[in-house]
Amino acid sequence: MPERAGLPAVHLLLAHPLAAEAIRRWGRSTVRDAARTVLAEARQQLAAGAPLPDVEALARQTVQRVRRLAAPAYPEVLNATGVLIHTNLGRAPYRAHPLPPYLALEYDLEAGERGERLAAVTTRLCRYFGCEAATVVTNNAAALVLLLATHAAGRRVVVSRGELIEIGGSFRLPEIMRAGGAELLEVGYTNRTHLRDYEAACEVGPAAILVVHRSNYRLSGFVTSPPLAEVVALGHRHGIPVWVDQGSGCHLDLSRYGLGREPTVRELVATGADAVLFSADKLLGAAQGGIIVGSEAAVRPLRRHPLRRALRPDKHALTVLAATLDAYLAERPEEVPLYRLLAVDPRALQRRARQLARRLRRGGLQAVPLPTRAVLGGGTTPEETIPSWGVALPGAERAAAALRHTVPPVIARREDDRLILDLRAVFPEQDRSLAAAVLAALAP
Ligand SMILES: *Cc1c(COP(=O)(O)O)cnc(C)c1O
């Protein structure tokens, strides 16, 4: 093949000093795969009439390719979006402390024998949420599947048509119901469901009534749904359990942070609901997890279902969850990073925004401090915003791309043609590194 004649064989390319150094650092197979791809591309370019590249150029391309392959898998970023629970940036912020190599995860130090893996978190959950029983699985979707599979397989579960939600594309309630082996029994209408609609459904002997929190949308206008306490009373009159897919894990009065008040998990439990489900990494501010709190009758049987083993949370998530609950039990929510961010006074944000703008202007950027509105995000309190401050930069498109490629990458928010660096989700100790990263990316 004449066009291939000029290109080196893979082993010759790998013998180049640049490639040899890359092999020492990243391993032979990674570099060899990259070299093969580079040669294949060069062959195509040759066939298209490009000049023959020299070995040096090919070795450089190989190293570049390996660098891209070996880039950090989940690099730290600065969240200047003003979205506190950002699904694409790992939901609730928390700092994971490295785990010791061994820990008493399911080992009873008193008895010197095997212990209960979840005991430490379930007792904390029961104390904090005022419930009889609790358990933890990998996420809220898993919690719902486990609940359905345990109590409702092959049976019907009543859901209002106004609550057939989709969250983030992959959580569709009807699909989750099928995955749990249950059949959906829809009642009411999109905007209105009455107690009598639930009552009529109770006649067919469903396994449960499921009430789903409208996490990521609001219905307004001509809207009716009965208070949860009435649904619970109705269900219990008919001997039918009532479950609540609460989702966000709202557990404190958010009005103290300038947000609207909504029922907390503890209040939902107090209505007598048999099970309340929510994520651990939304308003609870912990690592990924799905929590089920409620009655012994609802929660205890979950432990024996084979799926429970498949859905059990890892030791990292459990230790973060336990430490987070300890902060709430000690009435120190601001030790949890999410509430530390929420508690920052707008005047402090204003001071920091001015200082950031000054630093950026000194570096030659057109930076203007301005008041903004931040959001909780993660499908928790739709339509609600909290006061914040940020810095506006011109040329949104180009600036956003440059900021994503600096170290650490800065993820900002676009507003029309401006780029806003919102400080609500930036920790004060990150301010300097934010200024430095923005200057490195954009300074003229
Ligand atoms: C977020 C949410 C879920 C999904 O929770 P994951 O922990 O992501 O599985 C389910 N239901 C509601 C109401 C939610 O808000």
Image: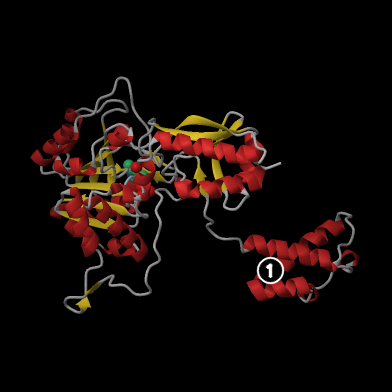
Estimate the x, y position of residue 71 in percent, counting from the top left: 61, 61
Estimate the x, y position of residue 357 in percent, counting from the top left: 57, 37
Q: Determine which quarter of the picture holds residue 112.
A: bottom left
Q: Quadrant of the C terminus?
A: top right
Going by the numbered disc 1, the residue's amino acid type is Asp
Viewer can see residue 201: yes
Front residue of 288/421: it is: 421
Q: In screen coordinates, is 19 left or right of 212?
A: right
Front residue of 217/154: it is: 217
Q: Determine which quarter of the picture holds residue 142.
A: bottom left
- In the displayed structure, 230 sits above or below 179; it is above
Residue extending farthest top: 222
Asked if disc 1 is less than 8 Å from ligand 1, the answer is no
- In the displayed structure, 229 sits above or below 410; it is above
Estimate the x, y position of residue 100 in percent, counting from the top left: 37, 71
- In the displayed structure, 384 sits above or below 406; it is above
Image point (39%, 39%), residue name? 376
**Pointer 1 residue:** 33
Numbered disc total? 1
Image point (60%, 34%), residue name? 367
Q: Determine which quarter of the picture holds residue 315.
A: bottom left
Image point (41%, 34%), residue name? 346
Front residue of 278/375: it is: 375
